[in-house]
Image (tube, rainbow, N blue to C red):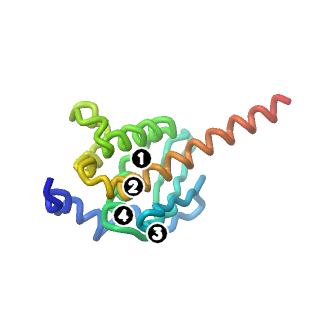
Amino acid sequence: MAITDLYNAEFMDHVSNPDYKYQMENPTCTHEGVNPSCGDELEFSVRLGDDGKIAEAAFTGRGCAISQASADIMSDLMLDKTPEQAIELCDLFERMVRGEVTDEDELAPLGDAEMLKDIAHMPARVKCAELAWRTLKEMLEARKGEGKAEAAKASD
């Protein structure tokens, strides 16, 4: 894969004009993610609607074009998803950028994020692409764990 295949107009639009890069007011939860190998860092926030689905997603931070574009693409994909659906998509994305899932039909739920599939051929950049996805997954799994702990306390 040529690096120029990844840095196409659609990809660069997510870097130059991200729709979801802003400080969210009153998020339901926020989580920080860091890629220590290159210094990319971001803070990801979501606001859950009354139906329990992700109503708003946003990120702030700095990093390479791949981490920033990946965060913007992911933010758009996660709108109207339940936390469980979001975690499943994060898992699928991670398997895609590691080259474990390559079938286009299996990758279809990722939508525009599928444009990052060739990251699998650039091992040094996988962590850049995964940063936002890993951060969201950690945040949602921690939130799910907190809910179980609160339920256990309530039943005591």
Residue occupying the point 19% across, 57% down: 6
Label 3, label 2: how many angstroms apart (C-alpha)? 16 Å
Image depth: mark 3 or mark 2 in front: 2
Looking at the picture, how far across and down is residue 71, in whole percent? 39, 57
On screen, residue 70 above or below 23: above
SS for tag 1?
A: helix
Residue occupying the point 62% across, 44% down: 143
Q: Label 2: which residue? A: 127
**Residue 125 in the figure: left or right of residue 140:** left
Quadrant placement of the C terminus: top right
Report the amino acid beneath label 1: Met
Q: Label 1: which residue? A: 78
Mark 4: give few (<14), some (14-19) or many (20+) Cα within 10 Å.
Answer: many
Label 3, label 4: how many angstroms apart (C-alpha)? 8 Å
Looking at the picture, how far across and down is residue 74, in whole percent? 37, 51
Image depth: mark 4 or mark 2 in front: 2
Q: First in sequence: mark 3 or mark 2?
A: 3
Q: Label 3: which residue? A: 61
Looking at the picture, how far across and down is residue 50, in whole percent? 57, 43
On screen, residue 72 above or below 94: below
Image depth: mark 3 or mark 1 in front: 3
SS for tag 3?
A: strand
Counting labels gives 4
Q: First in sequence: mark 1 or mark 2?
A: 1
Q: Label 4: which residue? A: 68
Label 1, label 4: how many angstroms apart (C-alpha)? 16 Å
State yes or no: discs 3 and 2 in contact (Cβ < 8 Å): no
From the viewer's side, name the closer residue of 17 and 66.
Answer: 66
Q: Quadrant of residue 152?
A: top right
Residue occupying the point 65% across, 39% down: 145
State yes or no: discs 1 and 2 in contact (Cβ < 8 Å): no
SS for tag 4?
A: helix
